[in-house]
Image: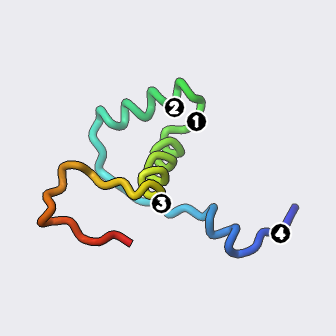
């Protein structure tokens, strides 16, 4: 087994969380999971990682409520 540097390992560590998600959104990712043979949890994580990389923001947040995101 190859030893990983701590920086490489930290990229692979995931935090377990609990979120409330609508049934329709969950159904969408579960259907996509069946189609792609990738677990729906991984698909959601990939989507969120893409949103972060592209610095995406929800369109429905009023400008007065926006704060700078790191």
- 21 left or right, relative to 33: left
Q: Is residue 19 above or below residue 70?
A: above
Question: Which residue is under mark 2?
Answer: 33
Counting residues from the start of the chain, the first of labels 1 and 3 encountered is: 3
Counting residues from the start of the chain, the first of labels 2 and 1 encountered is: 2
Q: Is residue 2 above or below residue 31?
A: below
Q: Is residue 21 above or below residue 8?
A: above
Q: Indicate which label's residue lies in the foreground, 1 or 3.
A: 1
Q: Dot 3, crowdedness within 10 Å: few (<14), some or many (≥20)? A: few
Whether pointer 1 and pointer 3 mark residues with C-beta atoms closer than 8 Å, the reply is no
Q: Marks 1/3: CA distance? A: 18 Å
Q: Dot 2, crowdedness within 10 Å: few (<14), some or many (≥20)? A: some
Q: Quadrant of the C terminus?
A: bottom left
Where residue 3 is drawn, which disc sits there?
Answer: 4
- 12 left or right, relative to 58: right
Q: Please, what secondary structure does the residue beneath circle 1 have? A: loop
Q: Marks 2/4: CA distance? A: 31 Å
Question: Which residue is under mark 1?
Answer: 38
Counting residues from the start of the chain, the first of labels 2 and 4 encountered is: 4
Question: Which residue is under mark 3?
Answer: 16
Counting residues from the start of the chain, the first of labels 2 and 3 encountered is: 3
Q: Position of residue 17 (x, y in %)?
A: 42, 59
Q: Position of residue 68 (x, y in %)?
A: 29, 71
Whether pointer 2 and pointer 1 mark residues with C-beta atoms closer than 8 Å, the reply is yes
Q: Please, what secondary structure does the residue beneath circle 3 have? A: loop
Q: Position of residue 19 (x, y in %)?
A: 33, 54
Whether pointer 4 and pointer 1 mark residues with C-beta atoms closer than 8 Å, the reply is no
Q: Please, what secondary structure does the residue beneath circle 2 have? A: helix
Counting residues from the start of the chain, the first of labels 4 and 3 encountered is: 4
Q: Dot 1, crowdedness within 10 Å: few (<14), some or many (≥20)? A: few
């Amino acid at each position: 087994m190859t030893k990983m540097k701590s920086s490489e390992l930290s990229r692979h560590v995931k935090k377990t969380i609990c979120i409330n998600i609508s049934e329709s959104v969950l159904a969408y990712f579960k259907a996509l999971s069946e189609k792609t043979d990738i677990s729906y949890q991984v698909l959601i994580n990939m989507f969120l990682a893409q949103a972060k990389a592209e610095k995406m923001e929800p369109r429905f947040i009023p400008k007065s409520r926006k704060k700078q995101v790191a």
